[in-house]
Every structure is written in structure tokens, then in C-alpha cells.
Image (spheres, rainbow, N blue to C red):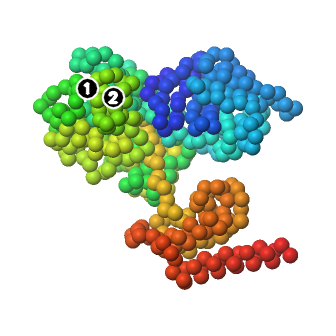
């Protein structure tokens, strides 16, 4: 993850991509532009603008200064986006149906997206957002990572690691090689070799603090694995046994101790950036578990790293939390390969459960470092945990399929578009109909405590479902006369 402050940058926020900055030009005032291509590539740009400037003017200037290409077209009501291309991705014109550039806007990250009426209709303000989505009427996709620095006090001891923007975007996958023990180039981040350069980490010095925000609510979702809701990544490092140094060799040949070098910071969360709730008893920032940048996959190593790489595959997923039963002490005597295997797809990091603070959602996270701590925490990234898919028919996501789910479905019965899972749309087509109620019927009575689904509902269950639908249809039929 590489960062710049007080300049325009772009982060790729697609889950499979590594953040890569592109300097589009410096400016005192910055606005945000999110672009969602039809092929699933999602980009987030921060673009400088002049006070009182409309979005079309700023996007046109960004086009001139970078490899981001935006084509505008004039209609009677103003300027509209006709085409966008960037980094090999491109969509343009109207290709039928919803295949055209839909424009969205909002004044800040706490505000919901609203459909725009052309880019010339939006006057830019500091921190405002514009969104461009091709091929869908849905608003721009949320980033799974923190997207904005709200407040930063450097504190004592941060040194040259004083760029708070380095805490945004996804955590590091690879980092710079140690020139004393490794060949030059980049090295995969592993639990015994963490990100360490000034363009990867933001330090919170003694007496300092760092406050960041997500572009959406981070939910205390009951389907979040292990009950964890967000993950913080630093550079806490598992120590190698015997005091050896990681040389980026065979991970099966290096054994670790049960100790982790960490510099913990105090973490608080907020819904509005004003009222804060603190994890007073932990977990802490920059603590166990160390980051793992790539999956241990000797059968499918990423050859782009070099011929030397025989072990490290695709990037890990920072939205997948590590099993909290794993611990630094439990890793004692294990090899780096064994530890990486226990991570699976997870990138590690420290998981936090906001439900432990009595909260259902948050949007802001703060790291504080007392002036007498004697340590300097480093922050690489924060990620929203990806919820597991709900069980078919469980509209309420409460690990039960029953009357409440039927009620949600019946309340939306017959709608053709605009609905989602909590509304009873279990097949993902936007509507609620017979396919959805068939899915509900096939899973009627399912309970996570007894997870074997009822393949065929009992007669009484079928009677409830049929009766509910019949009653609804009779009511609607009567209303039509």
C-alpha cells in the first residue's frame, strides 16, 4: 500500500487488487470520485478542485493530467458522462438496458448516495463524493477498507512514518526486501517479516492519535465469522526462534518462538465521530496477529514474484478474520509454512467485536497512544469483515428459517425489482415471487443449532406457507376490484 498526502491519489478497491497510487495533481481542496466498471473493476480517485467548481470541470482536468479518460456529452439539462477508461477497463455510450453511466453523489461519507442529474449539476465541496456506475442502477460499491483520515496528531516518536494516509486502503501484500539479508526487490509479507517502509505505515507517536472513517456503516452482523466486525493491521511481528533473521527462503525451514513484537495502541469506535466507545480491556492496535500477504500455496506459486518463489500464491483476503483461538504462544515451535497454512485465506490482523461495546454499527475508528506508553504503534490498514452468506430462506439472518422470514417475504410478495435478501428475494433477481417462497419452503424450520435443513416441509409447515400466500393473493385481488 503506497500513499501520498495533500495530493490526488487513486486506490484500486477491488478485493483482488493491491492499492496503487496515481498522482493526478496537488490541490488544497479534494473531492472523491468512485468509478465502477461493468466488469467489476472498482476505482476510487481523489481529485483536486477549485472552490465553486462543478464536477464536470474537475473530471475533465483530471482527464488531461492522468491516464484516467472521461468523455463528457452535452444534453439539454447539462453535461453527462458518456465514457470512462482506466487501466485497461473501459465502458462507453448506451448499449441497451441499464448499460450506460449512472451518476451518483453525496456530500460526505456519512450521507447516503443520491442519484445525480449529470455531472455539471454537482458543485464540488471538500470531502464530497461523486460516483459513476456502468450497467447497474445500484449505487457505487462500498470499499471494504477505511477511506478517509479524519484527524491525525503525530505525537512523539513517529519520525518519518507520519503520513496518516498510509492507514487507508488494503494492507500490504508485499514489502521492500531487507537489503542486508535478501536479494533486492519485493518480498511477500509473512508473520515473521512485516511491512516496514514509510509509504506503508502510519505511526501514532506518544501522545498522538489517528482517526479514520469507512465510507459505510460497519455492522455488527450476526453472520460475521467469529463475531468479529472489523480488522486492524499493523506490523506486529512473530519472532523467529534462536534470534535468526528471515531471508525470504523456504518457509518450512524457519521455526518461530511464541513471542510477538508489538506496540499496542488504544482503540475506540464511533458512529458519528463525536461520541466514542473504547476497547478499554483490548484488543489493541498493532498487536497479534501479524499480517500474511499471500496464501501459502506451493502448488500454485505466483511466478510474477520471480523464479525463487516456490511457496507464495495469490493475495490473502483482509476481510476474512483469523480464528481467535490461534495465539502467538500457540505458534511456538511451528514453521512459517505451518503458521501460514493455519491462516488459510485470512490476512491476519487484530479482530474487533463492536457488539462487545453494545453497538450495532460504527463508521469511525480511532487509535490513541498515551504520552507515557513508551511505544509507537504503526497502522497499515483497517478492513470491514465480510459476512458469511446467510442460509437460504433466512431473511432475518438470525440463523432460523420460520414465521418471521415468511412475514418479510409476504410483505414484498409480487414485487418485480428493487428488493434484496432481507425482503425475501432469495434468488437475487430483485423480485419476490414463487421461486423465493419455494426456497423458503425447502428450508422451513432450519435452525443453526440443528443445521440439517428440512428438505421437504412437514404438512403443517406447507399449510402455513400456502395459507399465507393464498391470504395475500385474496387481499390483493379484493383490492383490485
> Is the N terminus in the top left, top right, bottom left or bottom right quadrant?
top left
Describe residue 178's horizontal placement relative to residue 452 as left or right: left
Q: Residue at position x 38%, y 47% from top? A: 321
Mark 1 falls on what kind of element?
Answer: loop
Q: Residue at position x 39%, y 31% from top? A: 172
Describe residue 440's horizontal placement relative to residue 353 as left or right: right
Does any portion of residue 158 appear in the rendered image? Answer: no
Q: Give the tally of numbered discs.
A: 2
In the rendered image, which residue does mark 2 sit on? 188
Mark 2 falls on what kind of element?
Answer: strand
Q: In this view, does 320 lie above or below 293?
A: below
Describe residue 351's horizontal placement relative to residue 100 as left or right: left
Q: Which quarter of the picture shows residue 307?
A: top left
> Residue 383 or 395: which is nearer the viewer?
395
Estimate the x, y position of residue 443 in percent, counting from the top left: 51, 70
Q: Earlier in the sequence, mark 1 or mark 2?
A: 2
Estimate the x, y position of residue 55 in percent, counting from the top left: 72, 28
Mark 1 vs 2: CB contact within 8 A: yes
Give the numbered dot on residue 310: none
Describe residue 177's horizontal placement relative to residue 11 as left or right: left
Amino acid at each position: 500500500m503506497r500513499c501520498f498526502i495533500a495530493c490526488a491519489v487513486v486506490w484500486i478497491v477491488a478485493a483482488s487488487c493491491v492499492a496503487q497510487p496515481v498522482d493526478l495533481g496537488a490541490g488544497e481542496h479534494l473531492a472523491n470520485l468512485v468509478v465502477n466498471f461493468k466488469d467489476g473493476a472498482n476505482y476510487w480517485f481523489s481529485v483536486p478542485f477549485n472552490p465553486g467548481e462543478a464536477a464536470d470541470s474537475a473530471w475533465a482536468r483530471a482527464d488531461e493530467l492522468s491516464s484516467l479518460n472521461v468523455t463528457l456529452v452535452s444534453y439539454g439539462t447539462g453535461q453527462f458522462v458518456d465514457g470512462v477508461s482506466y487501466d485497461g477497463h473501459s465502458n462507453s455510450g448506451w448499449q441497451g438496458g441499464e448499460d450506460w453511466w449512472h451518476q451518483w453523489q453525496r456530500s460526505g461519507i456519512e450521507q447516503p448516495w443520491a442519484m445525480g442529474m449529470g455531472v455539471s449539476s454537482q458543485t464540488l465541496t471538500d470531502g464530497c463524493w461523486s460516483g459513476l456506475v456502468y450497467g447497474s442502477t445500484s449505487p457505487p460499491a462500498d470499499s471494504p477498507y477505511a477511506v478517509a483520515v479524519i484527524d491525525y496528531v503525530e505525537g512523539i516518536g513517529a519520525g518519518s512514518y507520519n503520513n496518516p494516509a498510509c492507514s487507508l486502503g488494503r494492507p500490504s501484500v508485499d514489502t521492500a526486501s531487507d537489503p542486508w539479508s535478501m536479494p533486492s526487490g519485493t518480498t511477500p509479507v509473512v508473520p515473521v517479516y512485516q511491512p516496514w517502509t514509510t509509504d506503508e505505515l502510519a505511526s501514532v507517536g506518544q501522545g498522538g492519535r489517528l482517526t479514520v472513517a469507512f465510507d459505510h456503516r460497519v455492522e455488527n452482523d450476526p453472520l460475521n465469522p467469529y463475531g468479529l466486525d472489523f480488522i486492524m493491521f499493523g506490523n506486529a511481528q512473530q519472532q523467529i526462534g534462536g534470534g535468526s533473521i528471515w531471508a525470504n527462503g523456504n518457509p518450512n525451514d524457519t521455526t518461530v518462538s511464541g513471542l510477538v513484537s508489538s506496540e499496542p495502541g488504544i482503540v475506540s469506535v464511533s458512529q458519528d465521530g463525536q461520541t466514542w466507545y473504547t476497547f478499554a480491556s483490548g484488543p489493541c492496535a498493532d498487536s497479534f496477529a501479524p499480517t500474511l500477504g499471500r496464501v501459502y500455496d506451493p502448488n500454485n506459486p505466483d511466478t510474477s514474484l520471480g523464479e525463487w518463489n516456490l511457496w507464495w500464491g495469490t493475495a490473502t483476503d483482509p476481510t476474512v478474520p483469523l480464528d481467535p483461538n490461534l495465539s502467538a504462544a500457540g505458534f511456538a515451535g511451528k514453521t512459517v509454512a505451518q503458521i501460514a497454512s493455519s491462516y488459510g485465506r485470512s490476512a491476519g490482523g487484530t479482530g474487533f467485536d463492536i457488539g462487545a461495546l453494545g453497538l450495532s454499527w460504527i463508521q469511525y475508528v480511532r487509535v490513541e497512544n498515551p504520552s507515557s506508553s513508551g511505544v509507537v504503534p504503526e497502522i497499515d490498514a483497517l478492513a470491514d469483515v465480510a459476512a458469511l452468506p446467510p442460509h437460504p430462506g433466512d431473511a432475518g439472518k438470525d440463523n432460523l428459517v420460520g414465521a418471521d422470514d415468511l412475514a418479510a417475504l409476504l410483505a414484498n410478495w409480487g414485487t418485480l425489482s428493487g428488493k434484496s435478501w432481507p425482503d425475501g428475494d432469495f434468488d437475487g433477481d430483485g423480485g419476490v415471487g414463487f421461486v423465493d417462497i419455494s426456497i423458503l419452503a425447502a428450508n422451513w424450520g432450519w435452525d443453526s443449532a440443528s443445521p440439517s435443513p428440512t428438505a421437504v416441509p412437514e404438512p403443517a409447515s406447507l399449510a402455513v406457507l400456502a395459507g399465507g400466500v393464498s391470504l395475500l393473493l385474496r387481499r390483493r385481488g379484493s383490492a383490485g376490484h
